[in-house]
Amino acid sequence: MIVNEALKKISTIAFKKNAEKVIETIAEELLSFNKQAKIVKLENEKTQLNDGNFYISIGKQLFFDDFNFDEISSKYPEGFVYVKLDETGKGYIVSSKTYLLYSAFCYLNEELAKEDISILKNGKIIQPSFIWQRISYDYFLTQSGRTQRCFDREKYIKYCARIGVTHVEVNGLSYPMGIEEGVKGETYQMFYTYCPALDQFVYSELNKGIYPYYYLSANLAYLKDNATLAVKYGLTPGLLCFEPRNVPEQLLEKYPMLRGCRVDHPFRSFKPRYNLTITHPRVLEHYAEMISKLLYEVPQLGFMSVWTNDSGAGYEHTKSLYVGRNGGAYLIREWKNDEEIARLAGENILRFLRTLRDAASKINPDFRVVTRLESFYGEHETVWAGLGNRIDVETNTLLARGWDMPYSHPKYPELKEVAGSLYHDYLDPKEKVVMRELESKGGEVHYFFSHGLMNMFESLIGVPFPWQTYKKLKSMKEVGVRLNLTQGGINPPDLVPYAINHEVFRKFFYNPDLDINETINDIARKWVGEKYYTKLVEAWKKIEEAILAYPIPNQLYSTFGFTWYRLWCRPLVPNIEAIPESERAYYENFMCTTPHNPQNVDLAKDVLFELTTQERCELANERYNKYLWKPLFEAIELLNSTYNNIPENDVAKEVFYDQLIRAKALKCWLKTMQSVAQWVMGVHGFLKTDDTAKKAYYKKVVQDMMKEEIENAKDFIELFTASKIEFMAISREGETPLIYGKNLPELVKKKIELMEKHINDDPYIDPDYMMKRAAMPVY
């Protein structure tokens, strides 16, 4: 008898009365094996292991004569699930952690379903590879993609639990954007949709009435709905907030002596934003009251991740604030040296984090606060020394200070902009030494990892790179990482039904010693059958070969900048200002940019940053043509030819169609990124030389690029309008600067028209654009 058949023998499903919701969820799903079975809720911990009796327990809720929970816990202190089952349906499943139970149950009825029941008759320990697998910056559940069309929150959270996610962030806004007031022409208010702060959900006595009650109520309801779904599947809900965030000016007019530091980006905002001075005890009470209120509403909240130095958040007198060291009156006096200021600023940070932890711990004693360290390069020693005792760190590396990255692109070692992306595919063993230092103080290190949307190819979903996914997981496990931090979240199962990266992630969670090639073959065989699986695996190999050849000509555009700066619908013309403003409005109105940002006319610039160079783009273009296109086109041809030869009634046809569309979408995305590199190469090359022949060469580079990009844009329109699957993030509520809308094909048609109209223009960038526009009225 196999395990799946034994599950059908279960006639009674029993668990402790008032047990965690996830136990009821699993009990209901067990009924699908035997609809005649009954559910029994026990008043005490006693059990009777008779034929057909199956028990579900977390911790010591139930007592079993042949199972010693304390003894097993001492052997597996990081967490375990114990399963026992025989051919009569008699047995039990016991989890040491609530958040492991559902994934272990799925492992039982999926991975072990066809195994002989003998593997469970004497009990089996299922041990996770990581003690936490938390989602950070969940694109679809709480961030920009929460307006995604066809997105089902419950299916998404259930899927997260199934594949091994243990902790999820639940604090998203119920509105497409926050209600932060801005100034006409600036972009800063858009950033308040990210990682919403505590005051977007509850108020304290200090700020009562500042935000409309209906707004707070709607946001809190969204948070609570997410948390309820998380708890249903056993996941630990938590928060990701930019804090301490700025407050509306009217609050500071009421309490002028509580003004903290300026926290806005002065190029992206047209008015200063200030937060409250967290040095003042009244402000700390304000934060303690807000986090307490949230824990009162959702006592299962288990953590709060605090991001800073962005999107209107920052700490007083830290070196990395947008406008330098500044803040309230109570932390330092004049003429302090940099070392003293850094120490005091660092202590202020720690005091704030401890305030959050201590207030939340009164309701949930296990509550953890997590911070990032990149912004604290000036205060690093003080902050690091004060971490521990449930104040943790999340990071890409502990081996560097600030934003430095000691890791490189696996194919192009000089490229360091790989933090957290699929190209950051290993960890140095030296990470372990620093990691253990924090663990010895009661802190944890959460390491970033991405196998979905975040940190590359935004806004595509379902891009396959299973071997890279495994490579990073394996390296993390070998180095001793205990907390895996999946950045960006998961591709929703309704939108990406064949997510090979996620399947590798799922299988690794309870089987870190898997053979990756064998595993990928098994997944492909399950999806498309014996006849076609080798072709699917070969296509994945070629796609991943092409992905690994991507030379990242511009890191910002490779991530959220691709959407911010409307690269899919923006005309790549030699002289952007040759297009009248009225004709540019269709995309400029939705760009995440200010009127004086040189990015508007120069694709190599953004605010005062140089995003890329002509030389880098020349090399990237060469690498595209030498390494990238051949394997990608081979993959597309293989998927297409196989798809066309599969009979209509064969399920394999659906799988190959899905992967074919995603490969074609990746081709369109990569081609646009090459076109941007060629634009920088050609326009900047043209402007840097006085040689007539070289000018002619670079102008032709731009014209050739435009012809190819026009054809690429036509391919994209056809793909978008004709395909039967969702291959990218698209809002159901209309476009914003942070997500494309359903009108994208119409916008791309305008791009094509403008590129055809301006193909013969000479390249030009106004060198005084920024200063000229800065002196012009916004409206």
Image: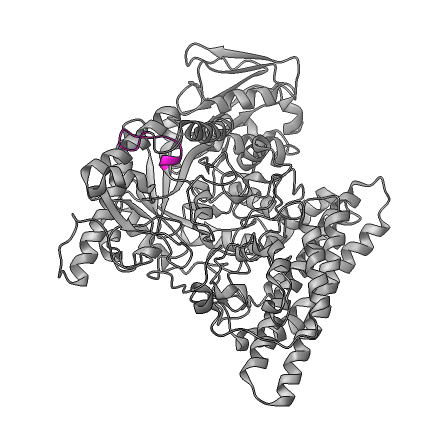
Q: Position of residue 158 (x, y in %)?
A: 56, 32
Identified at 56% across, 77% down, the residue is 684
Image vertical order of residue 366 relative to residue 670, above or below: above
Q: Quadrant of residue 689?
A: bottom right
Q: In front here: 362 or 411?
A: 362
Q: Is residue 201 magenta?
A: yes
| Horizontal side of residue 290 vs 157, given as left or right | left
- Residue 522 percent location from the top left of the image: 67, 46
Location of residue 557 by image quarter: bottom right
Q: Is residue 522 magenta?
A: no
Q: Residue at x 45, y 45 (%)?
A: 194
The N terminus - image quarter: top right
Q: Is residue 249 shown above or below 22? A: below
Whether residue 219 is situated above or below residue 243 in the rendered picture: above
The residue stretch that appears in magenta: 198-208
Whether residue 200 is visible, yes or no, is: yes
